[in-house]
Amino acid sequence: MSDSPRIAFIDLPGEEEIRAQMDPNAPRHPYDFGFLAPMSRLRWAHPRIGRALGAFFNEVMFAPGHLTRGEREMLAAVSSAAQDCYY
């Protein structure tokens, strides 16, 4: 992790390091845009906590509920912007 940028005082793993650990046969995630976003890299920096956050995220964004996917995305964007979160 020494060649990684420091964001929020946390050494983030590099993209090559993360991709080496990823399962190439895993189904593509709906948020796979071909690059690793800072939040994804942060989750990989803390595997145990990252798995829990990933499960929580998937539950909030994809589990059955009263809100549409667009409404969920809008709430996520607005709440992130209100907190000055650039992840």
Image (spheres, rainbow, N blue to C red):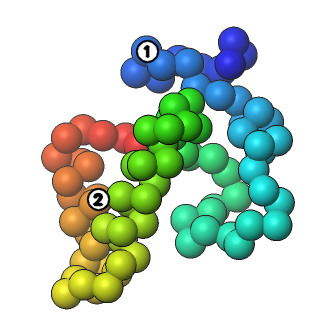
Please tell me how crowded label 1 is: few (under 14), some (14-19), or many (20+) other residues with Cα within 10 Å. Answer: few
Q: Is residue 31 left or right of residue 66?
A: right
The secondary structure type at the circle numbered 2 is: helix
Q: Is residue 8 visible?
A: yes
Residue in the picture at 74% in, 67% down:
26
Q: Is residue 38 visible?
A: no
Q: Which residue is mark 1?
A: 9
- Contact between marks 2 and 1 (CB within 8 A): the answer is no
Please tell me how crowded label 2 is: few (under 14), some (14-19), or many (20+) other residues with Cα within 10 Å. Answer: few
Tell me the kind of residue under disc 2.
Ala
Q: Is residue 23 left or right of residue 29?
A: right
- Quadrant location, the N terminus: top right
Mark closer to the chain start, 2 or 1: 1
Residue in the picture at 62% in, 63% down:
32
The secondary structure type at the circle numbered 1 is: loop
Residue 72 percent location from the top left of the image: 28, 73
Where on the picture, by quarter, is residue 60? Answer: bottom left
Judge depth for marks 2 and 1 and give the one in front.
1
Residue 10 percent location from the top left of the image: 48, 19
Tell me the kind of residue under disc 1.
Phe
Specify the label residue 77 is tagged with: 2
Residue in the picture at 68% in, 70% down:
28
Q: CA distance from mark 2 to mark 1?
A: 24 Å
Residue in the picture at 67% in, 51% down:
35
Where on the picture, by quarter, is residue 55? Answer: bottom left
In the rendered view, would you say 54 is above or below 41?
Answer: below
